[in-house]
Structures are given as C-alpha cells and as structure tokens.
Amino acid sequence: MNLFERLLEGALWRSRFVVLFAVIASIAAAFAIFYMATVDVVYLVGHILHYADPALPGEARKALHDETITHVVEVVDGYLLGTVMLIFALGLYELFISDIDEAKGSKASSNMLVIENLDDLKQRLAKVIIMILIVTIFELALKLKVGDTLDLLYLAGAVALIGLALYLTHASDGRHGAEGAGCDHGVGHGN
C-alpha cells in the first residue's frame, strides 16, 4: 500500500504540469493582443499624418480628431488586455509550477509580476480589469451622443461608480498593507 500511495501522490503532484497548457496559451494570447494593438498604432500614425494637411476641411479634421482619440483608447484597452493575459500566465506558472527566479533576482522586476498565492493573482488581475473597464467607459463616453438629461445622468452615474471602484480598490490595498505590517510586526516581537 505504501508503494501505491507514493506512486499515486507522485502522479497527483506531477499533474500540476497540465497548467503549462494554460500558461503557454495565455502567453500566446498576450503576444497576439500586443501584436494587434501595435498594428493598430501603426495604422493610426499613418492616418494621423493627414491631420496637418491644410486642404483638410475643418469638419473632416474634427472627425479625424475624434476618430483618433477613440482609436488611441482602443489601443490602450488592447495593451491592458494583453497585460492581463501576461499576468495571468506568469501567476499560474508561479502558483502551480515554480517560482520565476529571474523575477525574484532582478532589480527591474515589478512586484506586479510576483505572485505569492491565488488571492494575490486575483487581486492583481482585478486591478488591471478595472483599468480596462475604465478605459472602455471612457471610450463609450467619447462616442456618447447626449440626447437628453437622462443620458448625462447615466454618464455621471458611470463616473461615480468608477470613482467608487477605484476608492474601494485603494482602500483594500491600504487595509491589506496595514494587516501585513501588523502581522510582521507581531511576529518580530514574538521571536
């Protein structure tokens, strides 16, 4: 029974490597999204060169301006989504496979990419997803045609909810930081 148990536990432990499929797929998705957003930037720069054309009528210049701002917001949205996929891939790898030694030893490494547990991964992904939602609301607000007072009220409500989400995110960061500091402080005195 002891041999069977060791073999079973070894197989169960090694089954975590199935996560590599999700890691590789997420990295591929991140590269694809970064590529698409970069291609969008190249085309955006190509179109914006006509903005300084003196023969361009004022109405067409205004339309080009509005279209350019919308495209810039879409590009930011794309890069943020690529970042979500990258953080997700790195987090899964660190949680299930192994710590990334390059990230721990590098001075250029960001704490955003060092994932300690599943809650840490969820918190980091939530922050980037909130940023994507903010950019999306901004993009929709740029396209919004105000027809009546209710449209403005909806926009104001969306902005208020964004502010609340940012406040709650910031407040939870402060609370976790204070709890972590308190726990470390208490452990230091116990030893």
Image (cartoon, rainbow, N blue to C red):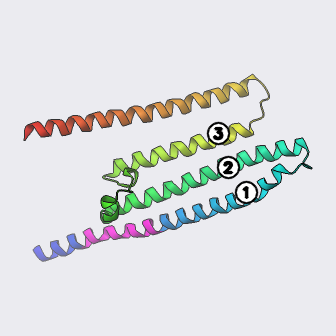
The amino acid type of the residue labelled 1 equals Val
Q: Which residue is mark 3?
A: 138
Where does residue 183 sit, x and y in percent of width and height?
20, 37
Q: Residue furthest left?
A: 191
Q: Which residue is mark 2?
A: 72
The mark that comes first in sequence, 3 or 1, is: 1
**Dot label at residue 45:** 1
Q: From what the image shows, is residue 68 above or below residue 166?
A: below
The amino acid type of the residue labelled 3 equals Phe
Q: Is residue 125 magenta?
A: no
* Marks 2 & 1, CB-CB < 8 Å contact: no
Q: From what the image shows, is residue 108 above or below residue 127?
A: below
Where does residue 168 sit, x and y in percent of width and height?
44, 32
Q: Is residue 107 left or right of residue 160?
A: left
Q: Is residue 62 left or right of residue 164?
A: right
Neighbour tally class for label 3: few under 14, some 14-19, many 20 plus, Cα within 10 Å: some
Name the quarter where the C terminus is drawn.
top left
Q: Is residue 162 visible?
A: yes
